[in-house]
């Protein structure tokens, strides 16, 4: 198959989908017009309630999933940083206030 055939098939599928979608909209419109106004209003209220229920259940599942994800360890193993000191506060060699290159030691430039 060459590229032109693939693109033609893709366009045909898209056109077919659009056609079916238009037919579905027309069918829905015909069904709605057959109903009286009270039926349509009742169905609208029932749909709103159904959507509220779906939203509340979805929020509950999202909270549950968030708790599960937060409780998981990333690597599933032990914490590799536990028991180690913070090098920014505890390393005297790195952050000491003494200078090894001073005049007392000969210095870098003065001998």
Image: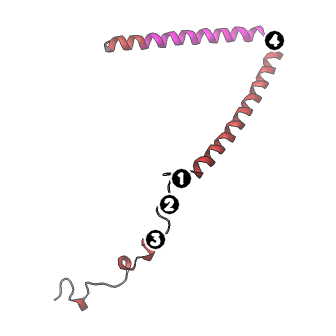
| Span colored in magenta | 10-37
Residue 36: mark: 4
Q: On the image, numbered disc 3 is attached to which residue?
A: 86
Disc 2 from disc 1: Cα separation? 9 Å
Disc 3 from disc 1: Cα separation? 22 Å
Q: Give the number of the mark in front: 4 or 2.
A: 2
Sequence-first disc among 3 and 4 = 4
Mark 4–mark 2 CB contact (< 8 Å): no
**Label 4: few (<14), some (14–19) or many (≥20) C-alpha neighbours in 10 Å:** few
Q: Is residue 42 above or below residue 19?
A: below
Residue at the location (38% across, 14% down)? 7
Secondary structure of residue under mark 2: loop
Residue 79: mark: 2
Question: Seen in the image, is 38 located left or right of residue 90?
Answer: right
Percent x, y of residue 22: 59, 10
Sequence-first disc among 2 and 1 = 1
Tell me how many marks there are.
4
Mark 3–mark 4 CB contact (< 8 Å): no
Q: On the image, numbered disc 1 is attached to which residue?
A: 73
Q: Is residue 108 above or below residue 104?
A: above
Sequence-first disc among 3 and 1 = 1
Disc 3 from disc 4: Cα separation? 74 Å
Percent x, y of residue 96: 37, 81
Residue 88 is covered by the magenta coloring:
no
Secondary structure of residue under mark 4: loop
């Amino acid at each position: 198959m060459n590229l032109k055939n693939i693109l033609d098939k893709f366009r045909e599928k898209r056109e077919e989908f659009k056609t079916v979608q238009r037919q579905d909209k027309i069918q829905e419109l015909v069904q709605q017009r057959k109903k009286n106004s009270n039926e349509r209003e009742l169905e609208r209220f029932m749909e709103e309630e159904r959507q509220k229920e779906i939203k509340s259940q979805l929020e509950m599942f999202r909270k549950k999933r968030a708790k599960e994800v937060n409780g998981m360890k990333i690597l599933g193993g032990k914490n590799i940083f536990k028991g180690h000191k913070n090098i920014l506060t505890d390393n005297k060699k790195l952050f000491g206030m003494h200078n090894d290159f001073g005049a007392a030691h000969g210095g870098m430039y003065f001998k």
